[in-house]
Image: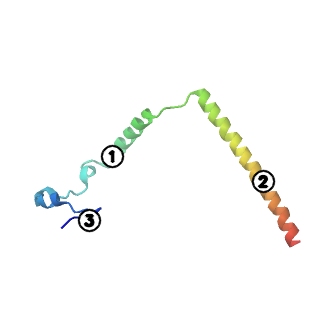
Amino acid sequence: MTDAVGSIDMPDAQDEAPESKKTRKGGKRAKKGPLKRLALFYRQIIAELRKVVWPTRNQLTTYTTVVIIFVVLMIGLVTVIDYGLDHAAKYVFG
C-alpha cells in the first residue's frame, strides 16, 4: 500500500533501540547553580549585543527626525478626525 501525501510515518524510528530514548531530568541546566546560569545569561547578552550593527550618529539623527515628523503628522491626523467627528455628533444629536 502507498503512503498518503504528507504522511509522517517514519519507518526508521522503529529500528531505534530503547536504550537511546533515555530521558534526562533537567538537562544541562540541572548541573549548574542559579548564579552560574545568571552569569551565563549575561555573557550571552553581551555576545549578542556585540553582533548588533549600531547606526552612525548621522543615521540616528535621520531616523529620529523621521520618527518625530511621522508622530506629529499622526497626531494632526487624529486631531482633525476627532474634531470632525465631534462636530458631526453635535450636528446629528443636537
Q: CA distance from mark 2 to mark 3?
A: 58 Å
- The answer to the question of whether label 1 and label 3 lie on touching residues, with beta carbons closer than 8 A, is no
Mark 2 or mark 3, earlier in chain: 3
Mark in front: 2 vs 3: 3
At x 41%, y 37%, the residue is: 48
Q: Residue at x 15, y 57 (%)?
A: 12
**Quadrant of res 18:** bottom left
Q: Which residue does the numbered mark 1 point to in the structure image?
A: 37
- Within 10 Å of the Cα at label 3, are there few (<14), some (14-19), or many (20+) other Cα atoms? few
- Nearest to the eye among marks 1 and 3: give it: 3
Label 2: state its secondary structure: helix
From the top left corner, tell me how far across and down residue 15 is, in percent. 11, 58
Q: Which mark is residue 4?
A: 3
**Who comes first in sequence, dot 1 or dot 2?**
1
Sooner in the amino-acid sequence: mark 1 or mark 3: 3
Q: Which residue is mark 2?
A: 79
Does residue 46 appear in the picture of this structure? yes
Q: Residue at x 13, y 56 (%)?
A: 20
Could you say where residue 57 lies in the image, as x and y percent from the top left? 59, 27
Q: Looking at the figure, which quarter contains the C terminus?
A: bottom right
Of the pair 46 and 39, the residue shown nearer to us: 46
Q: Is residue 21 visible?
A: no
Q: Residues within 10 Å of mark 2 (few under 14, many from 20)?
A: few
Q: Position of residue 53 (x, y in %)?
A: 48, 32
Secondary structure beneath dot 3 equals: loop
Identity of the residue furthest to the front in this view: 1
Q: CA distance from mark 1 to mark 2?
A: 50 Å
Q: Amino acid at mark 2?
A: Thr
Which of these two is toward me, 24 or 78? 78
Q: Amino acid at mark 1?
A: Arg
Q: Between label 1 and label 2, give the one nearer the viewer.
A: 2
